[in-house]
Amino acid sequence: GTSTMMVHMLTTISLVHLPVGHLTVRPRPVALTRQPFSRSACVRMPTEISGHQGQTLIVATPEEMRALKCPLIIDARDPNEVEVHKGGKAIPGSVNVPLNVDGMPQSQHTTSEKEMETKLNEAGLAGLDKQRPIVTHCSKGGRGSKAAALLSDLGFTNVVNGGSASRIRDALRLGQEDA
């Protein structure tokens, strides 16, 4: 027989403003699925962030991030960006898995699934449970979004882009960063 899936649409009406740069956040409908879980049936349309140069980034709402149980936070920034706290101080317990290959920006070299898998292994995440909740981020959300998409392509079923470390810290109510 054909199993049916109940999909509930949630829509946030109010606008949320981020404390970073000149970003505007527009909430989008989010579809949540009930068991049995099917990656293809789960439609995520979280928040769009429009930044300078007309770039639109998809990031999870604070509510979506808080709903994840014990998420693994993957920091897709380059190590030098983590060191200078670009996008916020590293979140304790997060794992740095730089999206860029050999420090080359995505405009020069787009990270492949195979390269992402290698990076996960190098970061000690080989054999990670594909259903584990994961929140990715970078300094603003671009590479975090690409990292989330690559993880999804690798079969991870519960991945969202949190934008920046500061935004995740605020969403998860982790308190103020140390100066």
Image (tube, rainbow, N blue to C red):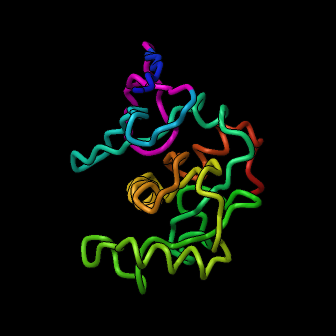
In the rendering, at what x and y percent does residue 149 appear? 40, 55
149 and 49: which is toward the camera: 149
Q: What range of the chain is rendered magenta?
A: 13-34
Residue placed furthest toward the front: 1
Q: What secondary structure characterizes most of the magenta part?
A: loop
How many marks the image carries: the answer is 0
Q: Which residue is located at x 57 percent, y 32 percent?
A: 64
Residue 98, image x, y percentages = 51, 73
Taking the spot 38% from the left edge, 41% from the top edge, the residue there is 40
When asked about the image quadrant of residue 109, the answer is bottom left
What x and y, as percent, mark residue 88? Answer: 60, 56
Q: Quadrant of the N terminus?
A: top left
Q: In x, y percent, where is residue 111?
A: 35, 73
Residue 139 falls within the magenta-colored stretch:
no
In the picture, measured across the screen, residue 42 lies left or right of residue 162, that is: left
User: Quadrant of the image for the C terminus?
Assistant: bottom right
Image height of 146 relative to 99, above or below? above
Res 91 → quadrant:
bottom right
Whether residue 20 appears in magenta in the rendering, the answer is: yes
Question: What residue appears at the point 67 percent right and 45 percent down from the top-left corner?
Answer: 169
| Residue drawn at (43%, 17%) of the image | 9
Looking at the picture, tell me which residue is in the foreground, 38 or 76. Answer: 38
Residue occupying the far bottom of the picture = 102
Which quadrant of the figure has residue 124? bottom right
Q: Is 85 on the left or on the right of 143, as rendered?
A: right
Task: Spot the residue most to the left.
Answer: 54
